[in-house]
Structures are given as C-alpha cells and as structure tokens.
C-alpha cells in the first residue's frame, strides 16, 4: 500500500506561450480542482509534489524556453523535490517521441487535444458539465475566450496546424454559456482568441458566423468590452467591421497579423494577398471606423528576403501608420512548407531589421499618442504599480499594447474599475492622465 504523502494532491501548472495555452491551462486546472487537487498556477514550492508544464512550440525561442523549463523540473524530480512531472501543449504534441527519448524523467507527455488522457492519468474524470467553467489565471476583470481551435490556413512559415490541427469552431451557444459564467465571476472584458477568427463557424454552420457571435455576446450582462484577436487579412469579411461598429460592447480594435508587405515575400509565405490589396483593406476598415486601432505583427528575415523586400515593408509601415505593431524574426521550422527553403538571412540581420522596424513604429506611436493629449477616454484599471494606477483604453489589449498611467497619490482606484481619464502627457507607448467625472 502506498504511504500517503503530506504533499499528495498538490499540483503546479506552468504555462508557456500564448493566450490559447493559458486558456487550456485554466480548463485543465478547473477539472483538477473538481477532482480534489490543490492547484496553483505558475507557482512551485516544496509543498507541490506534481508539476504539469504546458509548453509552446511555435518558434525557436519558445521551444528553447519550453525545453529549459522541462529540464528544470526534471532536475527537481531527480533530486526528489517533486514526485511527478507531466508535459503537455504544443511542443509535446509536435516532438513527443524526441522528448521521451531526450528527457525520460518526465512521467508522461500529452498533446494539445489530450486533456482527457492527462486527467485520466491523474485519476480525474473529464466532465462535460465543466466545459465552459474556468479557474482564471488572469486578473479577475478580464479573460481570454477561445472561440475555435486549430487552423486551415497554409502559411508556409507556420507550424500551428501541425500542433493544433484543423479549424474547429465552438458553437455560439457554448461560447455564450462560457461568457455568462465568466461574467458571473466578475469578468468585464473578453478577449476573443482563435488562430483565425474570420473562419469562425464555417465548419459547423457552413458559413462565417463571427458577426452573429458578437451580437450574442453583446447581450451578455456584465460584459462591457469584447476584443478581437488574430484575424487573417486575405478575403477578409467586412461584415466583421460592420459588427464592430454596430455593437457597443465590441471594442474598436482589431488584431490582424499581416506578416509582410513585399509581394515576393507574401507569395512565398502563401498569404494569398498582395501589398495593394492589403492597403485597400486597411483603408476600407479605417473608412468605416475612422478611430479603430489596428494591431498587426510583421515577420522579418523570411528566406530570400532582400534589402528591397525589407525596404518595401518599412515603407508600408511608414505609410499605413498602424496604431499597434510588433515584430518577430523568422524561425526555420521543420515540417513547414518554408523549411525546404534555405534559411539564408543571418540572425544578426534579422535582429537588426526587427529593431529598425520597431524604431519606426516607436516614432509613429509617439506621434499618434501626442494627438490624444487633451482628450478623455474610458479606461479599465488593471493594477497598481509604484506610484501609479495602470489601465487601458478600448484600443489596447493587456500585456502587448499601450497603457494609461494615473497618479496614485491623488486618486484611489480599484483593479477592474472603469474610469474616465483626461490625457495630459504622452510618451511612445504610454499615456499619462487624470481621472475626471462625467
């Protein structure tokens, strides 16, 4: 008979990577808690005898972080500091056989869609009645809401379909039920996430149904902001923009990763759109909603990217003046369509190009922010840090976008409060302001 340990039934879940992984961890933790486990997120101490690492396998840096994290806990297990170590997520889905061989200290590896099997290993039942229930790891006033899984796109640089499979939409009813549950927990802002938002509904309804989903979520009591992440630009359905404009709870914000602007590179990336078509799309979106904030992501150093290609991209950014922009360097991922191409851009060149684009964006952001001085915005307070309360406007998503700083010595605010703030100073990625009454 096994001797009962004082540390039994105490689990640490470590999440790496994107917000989709975070949602997966929250769902996993809900089932574990229902199964009698004491669960903590991203915290490990002597009292935790089981560790589950939810990995990312998207690009080289993410894979390296995931492997190093697994090794850290494998070492802890070897030293008797923990009893069991399990690994799940994208890296595990993609490289399970290699990982089992290289890091045998792990008790079991699971893929992104193998939560029931992971739970069974821990003697916990996967309960369908818990679907939609979430043990939140974010601040209580906002949450990520996954509306679909996987992706049917064929971008040549992307390994996501290899790890998460084909596009699978949740039903509108299931998403609304989850949203109501989150609202009951005090959530005020929903970030809708998917690998490809615009595909929502095609698989189960045989038509794109994102506008109808937004209409249903707009009616959920308690939710005040709904934010859209990760829309594919080619053949973009403008009905989504009309829905953003129509429904008051939907933020005037759209995360649309464009990846590049040189026709040569767009073709090689299999993005199914041209430079001019992209410009026309952005201009039309802004015509319909002049004050919308568009967040995009660019990828530099793709195989064959010439100085001319890069300069075309730089000129495109200077012309389009995106409200929010991030830059990644190309990672040569095996089994992707681009892997047959020579990874012929030195990492130093990739890094220099990324830095140059961010310098351009920094200036654009400063100029756009200065135009906000004197204006008043509705702001959601996220936290207190140092001498400031820190919040966001509807044009900003957590962790990646601009923030609004409010002097904490002259104001008392609570996390999750909505307040109106008059901007009196602007920096490249921050606004400073004072609370005003309506």
Image (tube, helix red, strand yellow):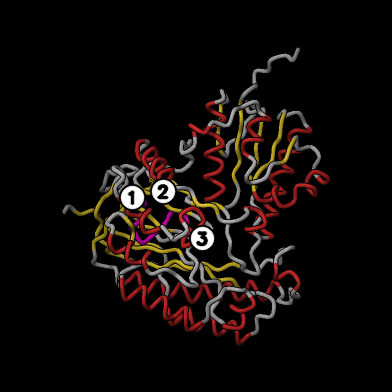
Q: Which residue is mark 3?
A: 196
Q: Nearer the viewer, mark 1 or mark 3?
A: 1
Helix, strand or loop at mark 2: helix
Q: Nearer the viewer, residue 148 or 84?
A: 148
| Residue farthest along the front direction in this orientation | 206
Helix, strand or loop at mark 1: helix
- Tell me the magenta residue range: 388-400
In contact (CB < 8 Å): disc 3 and disc 2: no
Is 405 left, or right, of 16 in this rendering? left
The picture quadrant where one finds residue 342 is bottom right
Q: Which residue is mark 1?
A: 216
Mark 2–mark 1 Cα distance, whole angstroms, equals 8 Å
The tag earlier along the polypeptide, 2 or 1, is: 2
Residue 153 on image: x %, y %: 58, 65
In contact (CB < 8 Å): disc 1 and disc 3: no
Callout 2 crowding tier (Cα within 10 Å): few <14, some 14–19, many ≥20: some
Q: Quick check: is 391 in the magenta stretch?
A: yes
Q: Which residue is mark 2?
A: 172
| Residue farthest along the right direction in this orientation | 101
Tell me which residue sits at (53%, 75%) in the image. 357
Residue 384 on image: x %, y %: 38, 46
Q: Nearer the viewer, residue 284 or 342?
A: 284
* 131 relative to 56, above or below: above
In contact (CB < 8 Å): disc 2 and disc 1: yes
Tell me which residue sits at (56%, 75%) in the image. 272
* 10 relative to 250, above or below: above
Task: Give the position of the N terminus as an image quadrant.
Answer: top right
* 376 relative to 184, above or below: below
């Amino acid at each position: 008979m096994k001797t009962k340990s004082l540390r039994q039934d105490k689990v640490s879940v470590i999440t790496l990577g994107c917000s989709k992984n975070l949602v997966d961890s929250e769902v996993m933790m809900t089932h574990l808690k229902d199964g009698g486990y004491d669960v903590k997120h991203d915290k490990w101490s002597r009292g935790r005898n089981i560790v589950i690492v939810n990995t990312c396998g998207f690009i080289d840096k993410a894979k390296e972080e995931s492997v190093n994290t697994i090794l850290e806990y494998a070492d802890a297990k070897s030293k008797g500091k923990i009893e069991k170590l399990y690994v799940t997520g994208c890296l595990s889905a993609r490289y399970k056989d290699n990982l089992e061989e290289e890091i045998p200290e792990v008790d079991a590896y699971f893929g992104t869609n193998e939560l029931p099997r992971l739970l069974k290993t821990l003697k916990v039942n996967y309960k369908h009645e818990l679907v939609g229930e979430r043990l939140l790891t974010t601040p209580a006033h906002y949450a990520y809401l996954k509306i679909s899984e996987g992706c049917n796109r064929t971008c040549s640089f992307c390994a996501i379909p290899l790890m998460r499979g084909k596009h699978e939409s949740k039903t509108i009813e299931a998403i609304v039920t989850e949203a109501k549950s989150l609202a009951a927990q005090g959530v005020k802002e929903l970030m809708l996430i998917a690998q490809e938002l615009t595909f929502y509904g095609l698989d189960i309804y045989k038509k794109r149904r994102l506008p109808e989903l937004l209409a249903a979520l707009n009616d959920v009591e308690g939710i005040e902001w709904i934010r859209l992440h990760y829309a594919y630009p080619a053949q973009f359905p403008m009905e989504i923009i009309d829905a953003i404009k129509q429904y008051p709870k939907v933020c005037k914000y759209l995360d649309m990763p464009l990846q590049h602007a040189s026709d040569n590179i767009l073709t090689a990336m299999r993005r199914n759109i041209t430079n001019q078509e992209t410009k026309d799309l952005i201009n039309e979106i802004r015509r319909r909603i002049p004050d919308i904030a568009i967040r995009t992501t660019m990828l530099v150093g793709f195989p064959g990217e010439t100085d001319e290609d890069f300069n075309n991209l730089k000129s495109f950014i200077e012309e389009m003046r995106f409200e929010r922009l991030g830059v990644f360097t190309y990672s040569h991922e095996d089994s992707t369509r681009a892997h047959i191409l020579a990874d012929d851009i030195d990492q130093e060149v990739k890094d220099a190009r990324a830095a140059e684009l961010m310098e351009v964006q920094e200036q654009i952001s400063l100029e756009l922010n200065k135009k906000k001085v004197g204006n008043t915005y509705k702001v959601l307070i996220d936290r207190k840090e140092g001498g400031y309360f820190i919040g966001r406007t509807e044009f900003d998503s957590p962790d990646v976008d601009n923030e609004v700083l409010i002097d904490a010595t002259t104001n008392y605010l609570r996390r999750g409060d909505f307040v109106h703030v008059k901007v009196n100073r602007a920096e490249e990625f921050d606004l400073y302001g004072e609370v005003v009454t309506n």
